[in-house]
Amino acid sequence: MATDVKAALRRQRIETPSWAFGNSGTRFKVFAQRGVPRDPYEKLADAAQVHRYTGVAPSVALHIPWDKVDDYADLSRHARDLGVAIGAINSNVFQDDDYMLGSVTNPDPAVRRKALDHLLECVGIMDLTGSGTLKLWFSDGINYPGQDDLRARQDRLAEALSAVYDRLGEGQRFLLEYKLFEPAFYATDVPDWGTAYAHCAKLGPKAQVVVDTGHHAPGTNIEFIVAFLLREGRLGGFDFNSRFYADDDLMVGAADPFQLFRIMYEVIRGGGYTEHTAFMLDQCHNIEPKIPGQIRSVMNVQEATAKALLVDGDALAAAQSEGDVLAANAVFMDAYDTDVRPLLAEVREESGLDPDPMAAYKRSGYAGTIVAERVGGAQAGWGA
Ligand code: LRH
Ligand code: MN
Ligand code: MN
């Protein structure tokens, strides 16, 4: 049992987001930190530090155009030299003035064309970087009843998704991300998993849903969504972060580690603990240092996963079939209440890593080096 759990933990993969390493903030203030990366090359260097000390974060998601470079093959080579790879390509059709009334659902066909061209350009970047995943999030929606036709916007969305789908090559897929609200406040065009699922189901297996854990109404049972999507073969991955109120983008597992455990349990239960599910972080470290913030987040996912792996499946099945409510719940809680930190420390040591990634990073002196070497770091994009 313990060896199976350890083997499963060793093969875990968590993807870090390039934008977590740049400055970020709220609409009130971006707090500049010293030593932050000045370009995508330096973001990859920082992400490589997270992998170096955790051993489970070997890929980095890019956000285009925040990470636009002239030569993507060169950027991929740079990543490889650092011991990491380029992961999901995140499209960005929300930061141009043209997108005020929407991108792919905009009533103006010229704006729709521009947005679609960007999405197709992102698939081109996947070709150049060898990335297999395109992440689509649309800020599209309306602020006032009657502002635009809800049904026509769904038609426009379907048309764009179908064009992107047709452009996908061998080994490429897109993940459609939903979000309840923000920046649109009355109606969002992809507000929930059902809408995302329905669009994906129409297109085919290369269209899958990504669950951003910060994109639901308070109280939503996210693990149910995970179980359902996995059952339908449509769970493409996660954007992990945690929230207290809205889309807070705080460190995953910080607000509700129990929810993260429940999600990871459903992932494992549903056969989703494989390389086909992308376990990505989508966070911003507005006030805490970024590299250790990412290390902490990776460790939080590892801890939730370890606990979920420890759920005694036989005991749970027996209690469930006997209808023993309290025994079944106790099996769950026993796993959740286990202190898995010693187990993870052992796994790290057995893999030749320091058992304490946070301490090892601190000792390395990297934080001081980047402060000395980098002046005028870049903004992540949020709050820009
Ligand atoms: C939208 C979102 C989406 C974006 C990212 C920066 O709230 O979650 O994934 O690409 O934030
Ligand atoms: Mn997201
Ligand atoms: Mn978000």
Image (cartoon, rainbow, N blue to C red):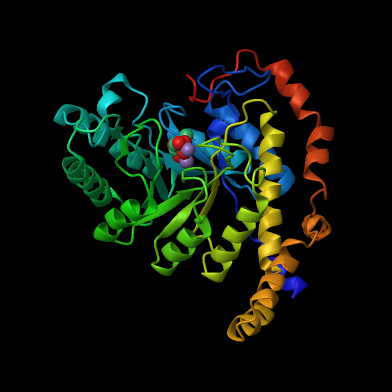
Image side of residue 305 versus residue 136, left or right: right
Q: Is residue 215 left or right of residue 41?
A: left
- Location of residue 179 (image quadrant): top left
Residue toward you, 365 or 200 = 200
Depth order, front residue of 32/348 = 32
Instruction: Work out whether residue 1 or residue 172 is closer to the camera in this orientation and state it.
Output: 1
Q: State which quarter of the image contains the N terminus.
A: bottom right
Identify the residue at horizontal 60%, vertical 24% (top origin).
Answer: 37
Looking at this rendering, what residue extends furthest in the top direction?
Answer: 376
Name the side, left or right, on which 234 lies relative to 348. left
Residue 301: give x, y in percent of width and height: 65, 51
User: Which quarter of the picture shows residue 152?
Assistant: top left
Q: Is residue 338 visible in this depiction of the protein?
A: yes
Give the tally of numbered discs.
0
Q: Is residue 22 above or below residue 353?
A: above
Q: Is residue 6 visible?
A: no
Q: Position of residue 214 (x, y in %)?
A: 51, 43
Residue 194, image x, y percentages: 34, 55
Q: Against 282, is 8 above or below? A: below
Q: Is residue 229 depicted above or below 183 in this figure?
A: below
Using the image as rendered, state which of residue 261 and residue 245 is in the foreground. 245
User: Residue at image x 83%, y 50%?
Assistant: 355
Q: For ligand 1, give the image quadrant.
A: top left
Residue 220 percent coordinates (x, y): 49, 52
Classify 87 as above or below 307.
above
